[in-house]
């Protein structure tokens, strides 16, 4: 399998971040987008207590679902099958694409129209289809834009948030035949709509994601705003849904509370324009709907998170994007810098399971641990704690019992290990600490002017002439 | 016993407290530590400074070196034999001792209970001043406008933005103004600032800008880490711009409170 475009080597993470940080236009762009989204969310939760209650409920539902994940998945499969929806299990990206390709070949599909699906990004669906001679076209406006530009989404909810109106106008006028340059948003949307309308009619297969899969009823819920999700799942004669195994909930009544915190946290909407529940293919006598419905359930490393009592919380995620909207780091570097399908705080905690910690560990360090993500996460994932855990794993001795993940220990260096050992020694031995801190105070005139990364942006830190302990001792005398 | 909004219970005023000054205060901002002692002593409390204190261990803990953090934390556990409250002039280190120590020693059958009991009596300075000592002193300073920066741990793990601002609000001559994105991190993040200097710089530069723009004469904070980061960045920008006088001043909240309410202002 060739390297997917939605994944960039982690070694160049810093570089990618730097290039955005040093670009004032991009930074302003992200900043105002994040301010906007934060404001929208805030307006949805005026009452602190209500918010905390909703988060408790949503988190309880997600934890309840995960606690019985294997049973629920079996139940889901049974009920979906009974409803006439075919269930496929995919261990990894390759499996998922192979399953989709099999279906596509059987129905002799040439064109696939896609609703928004981050899991399809995760498996690099579009390119795999393209390689097999099948066109996969995005129908969500944001996804359509990044696809036209040959890019990957930079945000899980707003894929094209890194693009300005001008860039989109430019893109459309270059890539869509017969479209003149226009910065008018309505005009741009109309352009997209016209192109896509035709494509819906031509497509042999519609592909969508899933927000919640309900075990009890065997139904798939799809949350969207543009109506393209409904088109994808009703117009073509085959519908393939793809999702991660963690998206299952036990009961239909579990969906409304999750849906409510999802839309309010994500885009600051009380409800979305569309909410689809798909329970069976077209029945005899029905006028529309696909003749076949398939669900591909993808693992792709999720079971690694599932197996760990602490990291399992990662799978509570409902992909609202609030953590990235509130992340000071994401706001400065944008989604592409992360180089993974899922950027921001959720990206940092989920990607190690999908791609291995060795490929992704710097993301766990790219956080000030400020906790803004944890504070807004509607399902109460303790994101900061998980980041710390992943840091521990990244630096654990690979042969020790602290190394439990694929790629654990990859971030361990001799130098850093020695530095922290030394640090620990100084601060846990009073005698050593006294000596060190005393000489730092005495030698303050010799404090280095160049303190590396610190003084790159700040004036040097200089110890006080007398330590607090010295001042207090003097005072007592 | 008093309960705050987050449901934490507070003891009655004790006769003695331990001061856990933190490594930053001990070495780089001893005056803030001294002012914390003065604030506590003024209430008739005897302040004990355990000589064995070094660092809470947070730098290693948050950098992903739990064993090294545990070794340092272990060396601090026996410094507080009496059942007195432990007052910490830093929300970040306070949060480490209160919330993360129990996790570090979770599996330790022997030390676990001791650590949990200790964590229960760790208080950040401003929460202690407000909820235990009911701080109320006439403001003797001149009219001034300040902005409050609360560290992320103090805010999100300890709820201390509320107690810090209650203290500032209690001063008649002090107007508190709010900088844009008041809740946002200053970009320090311990070793984050060393690992990702450009991102850290971008964040702290924005913080400096919003503080300068909000009309405050100075920024007050209960955490030295943030203060050094913000003021150090501001000073560097001043240097680069050739400004002779600082464009942003700042002070630890302990010093600010003491200076304004003590009988003989320094
Ligand atoms: S981790 Fe929480 S805040 Fe982030 S996308 Fe998932 S549910 Fe939303």
Image (cartoon, rainbow, N blue to C red):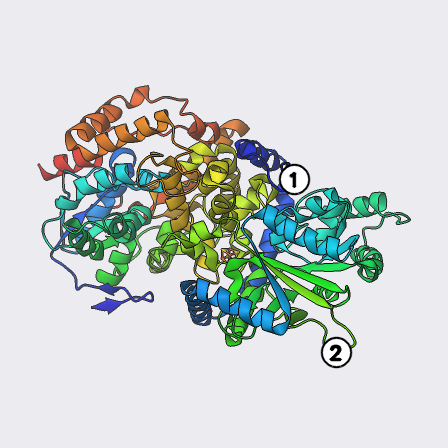
Helix, strand or loop under label 1: loop
Report which residue position mark 2 lands on: A284
Q: Specify the farthest residue to the top.
A: A446
Q: Which residue is mark 1?
A: A5
Q: Which quarter of the rendering shows the C terminus of chain B?
A: top left
Horizontal side, residue A412 vs residue A5: left or right: left
**Quarter residue A280 falls in:** bottom right
Per the image, label 2 sits on a secondary structure element best described as loop
Dot label at residue A45:
none
Picture layout, residue A442 above or below residue A260: above
Q: Residue furthest front?
A: A106
> What chain does mark 1 sit on?
A
Q: Is residue A83 above or below residue A108?
A: below
Give me the C-alpha separation between circle 2 and circle 1.
Answer: 42 Å
Residue B143 shows in the view: no
Q: Position of residue A342 (x, y in %)?
A: 56, 48
Is there any visible trace of residue A142 in the rendered image? yes
Task: Locate residue A176, reporting x and y percent.
Answer: 85, 48
């Amino acid at each position: 399998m060739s390297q997917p475009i939605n994944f960039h080597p982690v070694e160049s993470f810093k570089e990618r971040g730097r290039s955005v940080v040093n670009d004032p236009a991009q930074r302003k762009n992200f900043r105002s987008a994040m301010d906007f989204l934060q404001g929208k969310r805030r307006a949805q939760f005026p009452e602190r207590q209500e918010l905390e209650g909703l988060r408790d409920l949503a988190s309880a539902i997600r934890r309840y679902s995960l606690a019985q994940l294997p049973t629920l998945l079996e139940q889901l499969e049974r009920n979906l099958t009974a409803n006439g929806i075919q269930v496929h299990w995919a261990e990894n990206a390759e499996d998922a694409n192979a399953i989709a390709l099999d279906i596509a070949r059987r129905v002799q599909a040439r064109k696939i129209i896609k609703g928004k699906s981050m899991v399809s990004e995760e498996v690099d669906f579009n390119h795999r289809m393209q390689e097999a001679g099948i066109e996969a076209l995005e129908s969500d406006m944001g996804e359509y834009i990044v696809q036209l530009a040959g890019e990957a989404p930079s945000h899980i909810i707003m894929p094209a948030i890194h693009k300005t109106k001008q860039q989109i106008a430019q893109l459309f006028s270059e890539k869509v035949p017969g479209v003149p340059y226009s910065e008018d948003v309505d005009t741009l949307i109309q352009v997209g709509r016209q192109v896509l309308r035709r494509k819906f009619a031509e497509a042999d297969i519609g592909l969508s994601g899933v927000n919640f899969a309900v075990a009890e009823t065997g139904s798939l819920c799809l949350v969207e705003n543009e109506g393209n999700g409904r088109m994808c799942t009703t117009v073509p004669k085959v519908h393939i849904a793809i999702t991660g195994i963690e998206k299952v909930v036990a009961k239909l009544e579990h969906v409304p509370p999750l849906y409510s915190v999802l839309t309010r946290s994500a885009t600051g909407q009380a409800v979305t324009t569309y909410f689809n529940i798909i329970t069976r293919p077209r029945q005899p006598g029905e006028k529309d709907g696909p003749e076949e419905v398939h669900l591909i359930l993808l693992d792709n490393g999720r079971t690694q998170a599932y197996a760990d009592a602490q990291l399992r919380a990662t799978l509570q995620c409902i992909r609202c994007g609030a953590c990235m909207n509130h992340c000071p780091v994401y706001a400065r570097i944008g989604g592409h810098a992360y180089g993974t399908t899922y950027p921001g705080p959720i990206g940092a905690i989920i990607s190690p399971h999908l791609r291995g910690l060795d490929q992704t560990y710097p993301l766990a360090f790219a956080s000030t641990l400020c906790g803004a993500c944890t504070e807004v996460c509607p399902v109460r994932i303790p994101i900061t704690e998980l980041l710390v855990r992943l840091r521990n794993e990244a630096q654990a001795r690979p042969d020790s019992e602290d190394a439990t993940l694929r790629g654990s220990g990859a971030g361990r260096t001799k130098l850093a290990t020695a530095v922290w050992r030394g640090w620990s020694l100084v601060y846990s031995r009073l005698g050593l600490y006294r000596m060190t801190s005393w000489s730092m105070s005495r030698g303050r005139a010799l404090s280095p002017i160049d303190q590396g990364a610190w003084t790159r942006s700040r004036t040097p830190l200089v110890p006080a002439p007398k330590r607090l302990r010295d001042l207090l001792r003097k005072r007592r005398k | 016993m008093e309960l705050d909004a987050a449901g934490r219970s507070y003891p009655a005023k004790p006769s003695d407290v331990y001061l856990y000054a933190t490594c930053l205060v001990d070495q780089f901002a001893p005056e803030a530590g001294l002012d914390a002692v003065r604030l506590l002593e003024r209430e008739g409390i005897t302040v004990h400074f355990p000589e064995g204190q070094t660092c809470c261990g947070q730098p290693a803990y948050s950098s992903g070196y739990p064993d090294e953090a545990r070794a340092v934390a272990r060396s601090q556990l026996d410094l507080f034999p009496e059942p007195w409250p432990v007052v910490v002039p830093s929300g970040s280190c306070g949060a480490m001792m209160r919330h993360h120590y129990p996790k570090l020693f979770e599996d330790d059958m022997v030390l676990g209970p001791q650590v949990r009991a200790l964590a229960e009596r760790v208080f950040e300075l401003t929460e202690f001043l407000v909820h235990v000592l009911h701080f109320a002193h006439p403001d003797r300073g001149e009219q001034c406008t300040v902005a409050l920066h609360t560290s992320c741990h103090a805010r999100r793990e300890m709820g201390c933005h509320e107690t810090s601002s209650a203290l500032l609000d209690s001063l008649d001559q002090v107007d508190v103004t709010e900088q844009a994105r008041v809740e946002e991190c200053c970009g320090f993040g311990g070793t984050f600032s060393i690992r990702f200097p450009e991102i850290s710089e971008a964040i702290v530069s924005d913080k400096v800008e919003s503080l300068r723009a909000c009309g405050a004469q100075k920024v007050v904070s209960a955490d030295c880490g943030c203060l050094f980061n913000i003021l150090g960045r501001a000073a560097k920008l001043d240097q680069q711009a050739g400004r002779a006088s600082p464009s942003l001043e700042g002070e630890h909240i302990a010093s600010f409170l003491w200076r304004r309410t003590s009988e003989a202002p320094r």
